[in-house]
Image (cartoon, helix red, strand yellow):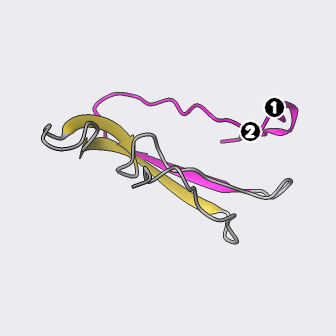
Amino acid sequence: MLAPWAAGPAIAENSNYHLTAESTRIQLAGAPFPETETWSFNQQSPGPLLRLRQGQPAAIGATNRLSQGITVHWHDGGNSRQLNLTA
């Protein structure tokens, strides 16, 4: 069975996303090991893969349900000069 992030989603037609940071129990090691308490985005660890077409703008909202601040590490396919994150 593939991990949930292995195949990745299709390129989004709707470029509005929302990420929720929260504590989640995830089966990391498989049976018979117990689930592990993790910090996750949208109940996934690692968080969801967001795919866009080149030049497609996106609105990405976030809710933090953790007791601490969060930081998101973005990958942009090697085009860091074109990655424009604004609040």
Q: Residue at x 32, y 43 (%)?
A: 22
Q: Is residue 78 above or below residue 18?
A: above
Label for residue 41? none
Between 76 and 33, the one lying in front of the other is 33
- Density class for disc 1 (Cα within 10 Å; few <14, some 14-19, many ≥20) is few
Q: Position of residue 2 (x, y in %)?
A: 44, 53
On-image quarter of the N terminus: bottom left
Q: Residue furthest front?
A: 1
Task: Report the span colored magenta.
Answer: 58-87
Rendered view: 12 above or below 75: below
Name the magenta segment's main secondary structure: loop
Q: Which residue is mark 1?
A: 80
Q: Which quadrant does the C terminus fall into?
A: top right
Which secondary structure, mark 2? loop
Q: Amino acid at mark 2?
A: Asp
Quick one: label 2, few (<14), some, or many (20+) residues within 10 Å?
few
Residue placed under numbered mark 2 in the picture: 76
> Horizontal and vertical percent for residue 79?
84, 35
For residue 33, what is the image quadrant? top left
- Quadrant position of residue 57: bottom right
Residue 82, located in which quarter of the rendered image? Answer: top right
In the picture provided, is 33 more to the left or to the right than 2?
left
Front position in the image: 60 or 26: 26
What residue is shown at x 57% (from left), y 59% (from top)? 17
Is residue 3 shown in magenta?
no
Quick check: marks 2 and 1 in contact, CB under 8 Å? yes
Position of residue 43 measured from the top left corner of the image (x, y, whole percent)? 34, 50
Q: Is residue 76 magenta?
A: yes
